[in-house]
Image (cartoon, rainbow, N blue to C red):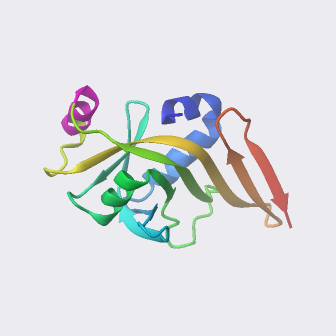
């Protein structure tokens, strides 16, 4: 499921997630190394044409990881910890597939004008999670998965 489909299924959570990713330029991407251990790397993301795009330098370890195993988790930059807007932490999980040539890549290049050459990955979402504090009392986790409504789990 792409970002547009997620936005249709859970518009409020999608809006908050886009705001959290838009608040900072750099975020943290987790990929899987060849031996199955996790690798974390800094990354910039873009929301264009109903898709969440991941762009990377040529030959980067994270790009090679995704080529081998497309599973990823992307954590929005939490900032300095003083955010009181209620946005909380946002994490997106899914699979990323490289886009080599064609109209989607051309549209991305036209809009973003990234340094060449580069790797471009289109994402398919398997979950979106937002965690925040409510009323200074509850830790709330909102969880969305394809085909399911957003669930809110609260604990004190």
**Could you say which is closer to the camera, residue 73 or residue 79?**
73
The stretch drawn in magenta includes residue 144: no
Quadrant for the C terminus, please.
bottom right
- Residue at image position (59%, 44%) is 126
Q: Position of residue 117 (x, y in %)?
A: 14, 50
Q: Position of residue 99 (x, y in %)?
A: 29, 39
**Could you say which is closer to the camera, residue 57 or residue 45?**
57
Is 145 situated left or right of 80 in this image? right
- Quarter of the figure with residue 57: bottom left
- Residue at image position (62%, 59%) is 88
Q: Position of residue 112 (x, y in %)?
A: 24, 42
- Quarter of the figure with residue 146: top right
**Could you say which is closer to the camera, residue 126 or residue 138?**
126
Give the prevailing secondary structure in the magenta stretch. helix
- Residue at image position (58%, 65%) is 83
**Could you say which is closer to the camera, residue 11 or residue 100?**
100
Is 97 situated left or right of 148 in this image? left
* Vertical position of residue 111 compared to residue 120: above or below: above
Quadrant for the N terminus, please.
top right
Total number of numbered discs in the rendering: 0
Q: Position of residue 82 (x, y in %)?
A: 57, 71
Is 74 situated left or right of 107 in this image? right
Query: Which residue is situated farthest in the front direction here?
Result: 35
Is 111 situated left or right of 80 in this image? left
Query: Which residue is situated farthest in the right direction here?
Result: 156
Q: Which residues are magenta?
A: 102-110
- Residue at image position (55%, 51%) is 93
The stretch drawn in magenta includes residue 103: yes
């Amino acid at each position: 499921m792409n970002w547009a489909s997620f936005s249709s299924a859970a518009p409020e959570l999608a809006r908050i997630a886009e705001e959290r990713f838009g608040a900072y330029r750099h975020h943290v991407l987790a990929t899987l190394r060849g031996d199955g251990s996790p690798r974390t790397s800094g990354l910039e993301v873009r929301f264009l044409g109903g898709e969440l795009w991941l762009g990377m330098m040529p030959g980067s370890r994270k790009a090679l990881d995704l080529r081998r195993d497309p599973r990823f988790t992307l954590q929005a930059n939490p900032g300095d910890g003083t955010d009181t807007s209620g946005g909380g932490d946002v994490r997106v999980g899914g699979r990323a597939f490289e886009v080599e040539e064609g109209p989607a890549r051309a549209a991305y290049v036209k809009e973003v004008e990234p340094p060449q050459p580069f790797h471009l990955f289109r994402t398919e979402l398997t979950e979106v999670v937002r965690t925040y504090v409510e009323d200074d009392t509850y830790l709330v986790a909102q969880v969305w998965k394809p085909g399911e409504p957003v669930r809110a789990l609260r604990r004190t």
